Image: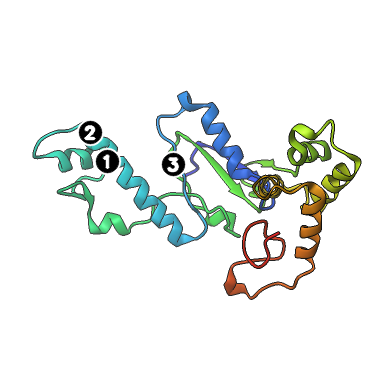
Amino acid sequence: MAWKRAVVVLQGMGGLGKSQIALEYMFRNPETYSAIFWVDATDQSTICDSGRQILQMLIAHYSTKHRGENLFTDVATDLGIPGQIMRGCELGEDVAKAPWPSIHRRSQDACATPLPACDHGHVIVTSRIAVAEFKLIEVLGMDKVSGLRLLLGDDFETASGDNREAAESVAEKLGYLPLALAQAAAYMVKRALDLVEYLKRLMNNMTRPLVSPGRGFVLGTLGPGPHGV
């Protein structure tokens, strides 16, 4: 059966702020939805974990409607899972192990993406790959002016030639990725660096070899650690 609920895919490379765009949409439309569910769809395990957490939150919410000895029974009935909630409003073993309909954010097989089986509600998918079956919104990097404004802040109009040139170099080396530029700007404020000094550190950082995969750092990481700038 083909469900008619609305699905939109925010597609783009990592660091473009796809999740932040989805979050901003929710903040701007609070009256549209009675509930908002965030699902970590990295893999099947995180999907199941998110599903269990969502169901536990729903149980806690519905439990405020009922009082008395049959609280757990009434909550289970409201949620459409009679007999699956134990005393104390904990999930029964069977339902706790069942996967929750969700979204595979990083799935390489779009057809295998589990989505809520209903005709209502909206689904926003953030993905690095294009999902042809659904409405696709491509998220692009920042334009040059926006990137420089993010790095220079209040000094955008008055920055010296050296700082402006350094800002352009930093933005280009970071690919005009919003999250990378925001992290760079925050790092400079924290360390009281100007853009010229930050660029020197960034260049030095980018000439170092990659560390071993198990360390959790990659070339160009913008935070503390052996490859932080």
Q: Where's residue 133, x and y in %?
A: 62, 46
Residue at 64%, 44% (x, y): give it: 17
Q: Are marks 3 and 1 in contact (CB under 8 Å)?
A: no
- Residue 118: quadrant of the picture: top left
Residue at 82%, 36% (x, y): give it: 145
Quick one: label 3, few (<14), some, or many (20+) residues within 10 Å? few
Residue at 41%, 34% (x, y): give it: 35
Q: Amino acid at mark 1?
A: Ala
Outermost residue on the right side: it is 161
Q: Amino acid at mark 2?
A: Thr
Q: Where's residue 222, x and y in %?
A: 67, 56
Which quadrant is the C terminus positioned in?
A: bottom right
Q: Amino acid at mark 3?
A: Phe
Front residue of 183/37: it is 183
SS of the residue at dot 2?
loop
Q: Which residue is mark 2?
A: 64
Which label is found at residue 37?
A: 3
Q: Are marks 2 and 1 in contact (CB under 8 Å)?
A: yes
Q: Earlier in the sequence, mark 3 or mark 1?
A: 3
Residue at 41%, 52% (x, y): give it: 50
Q: Which residue is mark 1?
A: 60
- Relative to residue 196, is residue 27 depicted above or below? above
- Relative to residue 79, is residue 208 depicted above or below? below
- Residue 215: quadrant of the picture: bottom right
Quick one: label 2, few (<14), some, or many (20+) residues within 10 Å? few
